[in-house]
Image: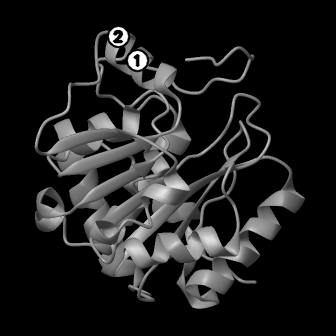
Amino acid sequence: MHLETEWIQGSMRIDDPNALVHEYIQRMFAWMLFVEPDKVPGLQALQLGLGAGSLTKFCHKVLRMPTTAIELNPQVIAACRGWFKLPANTKRMQVVLGNAAEEIRQVHWLASVDALQVDLYDAQAAAPVLDSEAFYADCRATLTEHGCMTVNLFGRSSSYQLSLQKMAKAFGSDTLWAFKATREGNTVVLAQRTPQQPNRKLLVQRAELIQARWALPALKWIKGFKPVDL
């Protein structure tokens, strides 16, 4: 998917519509390292930004989670439904047309989301569309006690550091984990509602289960996924 620029907003394999094509999209599921794998299907997922629908489809169809995505651009929703195999809305899967910053302040989202995935870029993909301390505080407010937010940060390193500082103010500096940047320049950052520092043995055990059950490269994740040192 392109939005009138050369920047790729999302991709899909025609022969496997639910597969996660891009490495950074796979890393957006690093929150799974902080929950018991058996509990995943009962958790609530929320995406801010639909892209090509990869996160939404994977949560709904593969992980079997109740899933909602919020998307500002009606053309993106139409493209996902027409070309990217995104299902129609059901009781367990909803795509909401709206402004993410406004929608997440709705009372019904408070303390209700277990996995919040934020990927908000415009057509130029120069920096996150929503990237303020107030926005990240609103994101934190949507999370359950042990919920996590994963964010795709793409752009200059200076912008990345500023984003980290804003997240740290909203979530706390002891709640942040991050991957190294992909070759394309995407850095996925995770923020926890409640700080967790699981030992490596537990992370490896969960990664093995995630990889065996859902074919995500979770063992590869833990080699470069570390707490952020600000």
Label 2 environment density (alpha carbons within 10 Å; few <14, some 14–19, many ≥20):
few
Residue denoted by label 2? 82
The x, y position of residue 141, in whole percent, is: 43, 78
Q: Residue at x 29, y 10 (%)?
A: 15
Q: Residue at x 29, y 17 (%)?
A: 85
Amino acid on which the number 1 mark rests in the picture: Ala
Amino acid on which the number 2 mark rests in the picture: Gly
Determine whether label 2 and label 1 are within 8 Å by CB. Answer: yes
Residue nearer the viewer, 201 or 192: 192
The x, y position of residue 30, in whole percent, is: 42, 60
The C terminus lies in quadrant: bottom right
Residue 96, placed above or below residue 142:
above
Q: Residue at x 67, y 85 (%)?
A: 169
Q: How is the image coloured?
A: one colour
Which mark is on residue 17?
Answer: none
Secondary structure at numbered mark 1: helix
Relative side of 192 to 41, left or right: right
Residue denoted by label 1? 78
Relative side of 20 to 3, left or right: left
